[in-house]
Image (cartoon, helix red, strand yellow):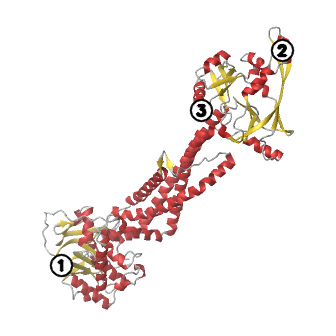
Amino acid sequence: MLKLIDVGKKYKRNKDQYFYAANSINYEFSETGFYLLYGKSGSGKSTIANLIASFEKPDEGHILYENIEINKLNQVNLNYYRQKIVGMVFQHYNLIEDLTVLENVILPRKIIQDKLSNAVADAEKILDELNIRKLENKVCKNLSGGEKQRVAIARCLINNPKIIICDEPTGALDEKNSIQVIKLLKKLSKRHLIIVISHNYDLIKTYADNILYLSDGKLKEKHNLHYINSLKRFNFKKNHIHFFNFIKFSIKNFLNNKIKNLLILLSTSFCIFSSLIVLGFVNGSNDFLNKETYARFDYSFSTISKIEEIHIDNSFLKLNKMERLSHSELEKLISSYPFISFGMNYNKLLENSSAYIDNHKLESYSLSFVYNFDCINKELIIVGEKTANDGIYINESLDKKLQEKLNIKTALGRYINIKLFKEFRFDLYDNGEQISDKFSFEKSYFVKGIVSEFNFLSTPKIYLCYQDFDSNMKNISSINLSKYYSKNYTWFDYIYNSSGNEEQTSFSHYIFLNDLSKIRDFDAFIDSINSTDDIEVSCDGYLLKNTFEDIIYAIRIGVFIFMILTIIGMVLIIGISSFSTFAFKKKQNAILISLGINIEQLFSIYILENFFILVLSLIFGFILSFIFQPIINKLIFNVFQLKDLINIPFITAFNIPLFLPTIIVFFSFFITYFSTYLPIYFSKNINISKELKDE
């Protein structure tokens, strides 16, 4: 049955010295019977009990059960041994204090996945025998010492073990209850091997079949046994714990650590919330870049120049010389791009512009061209006419400014008078003569509509039709140049006939996109031109879009780093919390292991506890992100005038329904599992006998 062969167990006394708590113990127990193991304190009784219960391994010798060496069992069979073969009744109970009496008693049956109804029926029968049935729904921490002792005995008996080890089973009982417990153990000894460690020699000797006396780690009476070398392999059934059997443990742990779990809940909720906001920013900024950055009325208004790089002698510096392309060069360059038109650069004529509305002079505005009013993004016109042959459009920024200055509802439907004036001096190179003339232009334009556009770093603007303005320049003559050339000589002629390196040409031409459906092709055209060394296209809309893309990219890096740091923080918080909870609950863990649960199954309690927190965190995180998304967007819009920059795809992402919530949930559970499992795994070695020793 159970054999101890030359069993020895030693402990460290100090750095270099050891002492034997059990020394050369040889004994063979019968299959059933009542054994009393007694001796003075420190004689080795508890050490022998822990070795038989497999809570510790012997340093010397062998412990065999049915010729199977206990300390050589694998973890699966060792768990079975603790579940079905050996049961331990501790002097100080070692109950799960937060569970009820019935929950404690049926706990070993839950570990082996027995039917709950069977476990409860057997438990109630044992509780009746021990006269504590009335306590079955009482939480164990509220019991007296004697009541706890009887609950501990009941828990030991529930799995009907072959060997029952009782460490001072009557230590906390009065005489009447002590006799009742010993009589019960005596009755059980007819079917079980009962080993009782007790100082109550006078009481128990009456019932004991065998009395073993220990002194200084040695058994006073020895039996000469022969070591049996042929050891069988365990063929016992492997018992799995059902995951949900320990939900109550997880809930108890959760409720017993309210403050700690609240902090974890807040931190993980913040991590999930911030991750959703970051991902919403990435998604929203992509949408914004793909849509809003093109939402400029004059996106296609650009200039094109030749660039010549001039190196300065004896210097690392170099200069860029700009020059206007010839008309033939420009026509050849854009011949493959039918969606691009070009025209004269009138920037010099616009230098001294002024504009008036209701006799109020406009300040801090700029003039910009669109090719014609058929080549505009009509979606940007928020009020006013979608089609027009004349007049002007103004952006929302200018309209708001005029509303404040003039105390009007809108500038729509009013007239803006634009005046241009510039004095020119002409060098006539054929005879060295110089003449001068004054350019003057004035026209009242009807405000046809208000434009809402991407106005990041933008100024109040008035949008003129280039074809209309160009037609005006072809009809306004330069008086002195006309006299000189003896023919009508317009300001268009002046700009057109100037050489490419003269200042009045602004060293460039205007180019326009005349088909808005080709806007990305226009970007590709600019990219291809600017990739060369000798020609450059300058487009405010294109430059602004790229600048904003760079800013968004830099912000993305920052928010991604922030998200990674919050995730690392979440991992550390969950990990440290799990480790501290595991360490704090070491005694509970040792009790469960002593009942046959394995370390992986034990982890499920702590993982499940953190999963409870995670589920709440996910709920709060999603609710917070749903509530704060519009608030954050409003703040961003008020400060930067950027609309819907954060757009969390709760419903659909990549055309997959609920893709983002699914990924967040999956990833969060993975992080929680990893953060819980890893620190516990590295601290999993529990000294059962140390944790369950008498206090």
Q: Residue at x 40, y 58 (%)?
A: 677
- Seen in the picture, residue 444 relative to 275 is either above or below; the reply is above
Asked if residue 676 can be seen in this view, the reply is: yes
- Residue 21: horizontal and vertical position, in percent? 27, 72
Q: Residue at x 52, y 68 (%)?
A: 259
Say which residue label 3 marks. Answer: 517
Q: Secondary structure at mark 1?
A: loop
- Seen in the picture, residue 166 relative to 478 is either above or below; the reply is below
Mark before the other along the chain sequence, 1 or 3: 1
The amino acid pointed to by label 2 is Ser
Res. 32 mark: 1
Q: Quadrant of residue 523?
A: top right
Which class describes the residues within 10 Å of circle 3: few (<14), some (14-19), or many (20+)? few
The amino acid pointed to by label 3 is Ser
Q: Is residue 22 left or right of residue 496?
A: left
C-alpha span from label 1 to label 3: 94 Å
Mark before the other along the chain sequence, 3 or 2: 2
C-alpha span from label 3 to label 2: 42 Å
- Residue 185: horizontal and vertical position, in percent? 24, 83
Res. 482 mark: 2
